[in-house]
Image (cartoon, grey):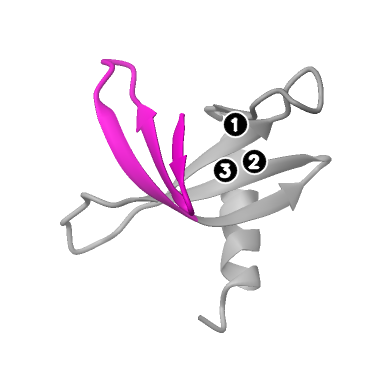
Amino acid sequence: MEELDNIFTLADAEENEIDYELLDVVPFEGGEYAVLLPLDDDSDEKSVTILRLLSGADDDAEETLEGIADERVLNEVFRLFLERNQEE
């Protein structure tokens, strides 16, 4: 994962690199979730990507991101994200 301020480049399952803007980190049920916006999304309806942040084994280890299969978690994190960012 390459980081430039709040812009991240991540690789998808086919190893295609995609740039994302980090919109927020939302705490939920003891974990932290990154809410990311794809920068090259030209569609009229923007969609975010939500990934769980996993801490490294020690303080110097890099954080990693993990996909989420649980729809309830995705919906709750998105709801919290909207509440936290409703002023913007």
Up-down: is 29 above or below 2? below
Res 83 → quadrant: bottom right
Q: Which residue is mark 2?
A: 73
Badge 1 amino acid: Asp
At 75% from the left edge and 47% from the top edge, which residue is drawn?
A: 28
Residue pointed to by mark 1: 70
* Disc assigned to residue 80: none
Residue 45 lies left or right of residue 67; in this view the side is left
- Percent from the top left, x then y, of residue 35? 52, 50
Asked if the residues shown at circle 1 and circle 2 are in contact, with their CB atoms under 8 angstroms apart, the answer is yes
Relative vertical location of residue 45 with respect to residue 34 in this rendering, above or below: below
- Inter-mark Cα distance, 1 to 2: 5 Å
SS for dot 2: helix
Measuring from the top left, give residue 58's x and y in whole percent: 81, 21
* Tag 3 and tag 1, C-beta contact below 8 Å: yes
Left-right relation of 6 to 12: right
> Three-letter amino acid code at disc 2?
Val
Residues at marks 2 and 3 touching, judged by CB atoms closer than 8 Å: yes
Residue 9 part of the magenta segment: yes
10 Å crowding of disc 1: few (<14), some (14-19), many (20+): few
The x, y position of residue 1, in whole percent, is: 46, 29
Q: Which mark is residue 74?
A: 3
14 relative to 87 in the view: left or right: left
Q: Amino acid at mark 3?
A: Leu
Q: Which SS class for mark 3?
A: helix
Residue 16 in which image quadrant: top left
The stretch in magenta equals 1-22
